[in-house]
Image (cartoon, helix red, strand yellow):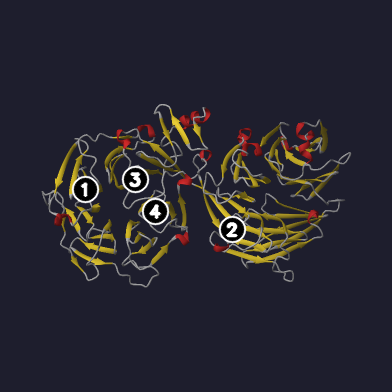
Amino acid sequence: MKLKVIDPRLSIFQAFIPIETFSKLISYNKINLETGNFVLSNMNVKWPLRFIKEYTLCFIFTLLIGQNEQLFSQHNLHFKSYTSNNGLPSGSFSEILKSPNGYLWLHSENGISKFNGYDFTTFYFNSKSDKSITSTQMLMSFVDSLGNLFLASKNALFLFDDATNEFKKLLGFENLNEMVFFQSDNRRSYVLLKNNLYTIQINPIRIKKTVIPNISFMRYTTSSLLSNGKLYLTTSDQFFLLDLSTLKFQQHYFKSPVKLPIQLNEVKNGVVQISAPNQLFNYLPSSNKIIELTARATETSQIRNHTNLKLSINGCLYYLNRAGLLSKLDLVSGSIYEIDLAKLLKPKFKEDILFYNLTKGTNNNIWVENIGAGLIEIDLQNFEKGIKNHFYEGNSSIPTHNCNKILEDSDGIIWLLSAGKGLIKAEKIKSNFSTIYSSSNQSNQATTNVRSIIEYAKNKIAVGTLEGSYLMDVGENEAESFNFLNSDFYNNSTPISNITLSNNGEIWLSNWLNKSIIILDPTKEKSTLINNTDSNKFGGPTLRCSLNDGEDIYWGSSNNALFINQNETKSSSKDPIEIALKRDEFSKNLGIIFCLKKLNKDKIIIGSQNGLYFYSIKNDSLTAFLSKKESEIKINGTDIRSLHLQNSSLLWIGTNGKGLIKLNLLTHETKHYTTSNGLSDNFVYTLLEDAHGYLWMGTNTGLNKFDPVSEYFQFFTEKDGLGFDEFNTNAACKLSSGKMAFGE
């Protein structure tokens, strides 16, 4: 038997391992993140993340946004590819960025593509139009805080106009190296071009030109720093300061030419540090002087002679050479740290790895662009520890080892450009999947045929399988409290088709084969067998589903019949009684009834092998759902395996082979979701809604999470840490604590 349990309230690992315990396991090398196995010494149990041959529980912990980001593990990214089949333009892409208003921009040899999360719009170059980019050779991209996109070619600056959906040329110049683009604290954009300062305002577009006459030479700026309304710039022989409030410009000459590249870094009290190969200066604003200091290791290191593959973050320079040596130069302390990425990765990859570049993340981290090693993340706070996370085809669902360009946006989504694989979206999973062995004495017997799960008391569940039934304590927070409860008072080897809970807390288990019901009283540890030899009473061999509406218990059978156990105040009999249904002409053959949902006081929704039906309690009448409107999916005749009523008018329908259907019960409007919309599989066996409004679906090929608002699917498989990929009809339950359990 296998289960999966989801807890939307808990942070990663807290639900089954205390954080302090997890930290100790890491520190004592008790966890192998490569194989996914770890050992708890107090349980003497090994917990693999893959296939197992004993009774297991697979716990899934769904995070609230922003909690314990540092604990995302190897399997906590979900990857989705966009190729030409999704509208991605052909060609080789060289750059990727995202604007604050949510659009993704891609540079290719054929044009600039805009992606809104669903559709691609490509703007092709036209050298003869002033409403188009005049060259596809875009060398720089800038996005301001308002979401405006600026593009710079080798001789022009362009702005994208959202209102007209066009690019507009703002400025022309002879050489891109003549231009410095920056954005001030006043949310205006500026361009410094030779001895002219251009102030750019948007909506409407206004460009104000201010001449700064005392600039003698402003070409080939090597470094710039904007701080507190002041712009600092350097060339090989000059240091400049521009006060944007007064437009006062100051110019300083170095005594002798400074070797490139130069790095500007603000230190205490407005002092600006000027760090160059073999030289170190401080600019003192109080005296308006530049003072030369003794060069440190960060200035004298040969690394400073490299101009490529450099990233500046929080006073530190990060260099990466083609061979994979990553260096951190701390310009505040003067210290140098190094990581040999090639050496760390060599055991996993036989082919040579080409290291491309570094890109800044959003959580004090950097990503390593490369060909051949997959997605690599470095934690800057723990730089000396090496690789924080590594995603490749062998340990995750990433479809490539080539990450040519990487962008982590403000939402924590990582976007990749990969040669041959197009655009890849890597989204952090707000869930953690792990497989836990039980120490139950039943563990010598294996089954994966879970048919029903209910919660009969807080954190206590009853599980029915084709090889028996079990009562379990799934615990409040920790896996140590998980255990199988006493089953000596009943025969737990009976195959079970369905479980329901009576109004007085009794557990009713329907037998898969013997046309009987076992009634368990877990508090008194007492069981009662209702053995019925009259097959007509039970409508065939199996009661497949049930519904307790607060008064009576309804059962759906496997042969076209609906049964009822009436409340004790109405009947003293505990035998399910077949309801004599008044059927309309379309309801004569329900087939197997898989699911029941209470719509209102009078009506029960029935999902069956042959479609959707409504049962009237008042009239004992059965009517088939017939849409008032033509739709692309006909619900009548569809094999329905799961139902979820989101409100009194919105019904979600999981089908056997036709995907997910959204049905408005008032208007009869439908919307159809299949694998073409991102669903992993068109066989939707279970449907549960978590506290955040997301729908969770068990299918034949993984667990799916669906956002009804954005209509975005995520699906998780064994590569994401699940213990199994295939789920069963009705084997799902939402617990009162917010956890959700799924069975295979």
Q: Which mark is residue 699?
A: 4
Q: Position of residue 458 (x, y in %)?
A: 30, 39
Q: Is residue 225 left or right of residue 506?
A: right
- State the SS at label 1: strand
| Amino acid tagged 4 | Thr
Residue at x 22% of width, y 65% of height: 622
Residue 208 lies, with reference to residue 455, above or below; the image says below
User: How far apart are the alpha carbons under marks 2 and 4?
Assistant: 32 Å
Badge nearest the viewer, 2 or 4: 4
Front: mark 4 or 3: 3
Q: Which residue is mark 2?
A: 103
Which residue is located at x 46 percent, y 58 percent?
711
Q: Which amino acid type is marked by label 2?
A: Tyr
Query: Would you call the spot at circle 1 few (<14 residues within 10 Å), some (14-19), or many (20 or more)?
Result: many
What distance separates the C-alpha of mark 1 from that of mark 3? 17 Å
Report the Cα–Cα distance between label 4 and label 3: 15 Å
| Image vertical order of residue 294 relative to residue 49, above or below | above
* Residue 741 coordinates in the image, percent (x, y): 35, 45
Residue 220 in picture, x, y percent from top left:
82, 50
**Residue 520 as seen in the image, left or right of residue 257:** left
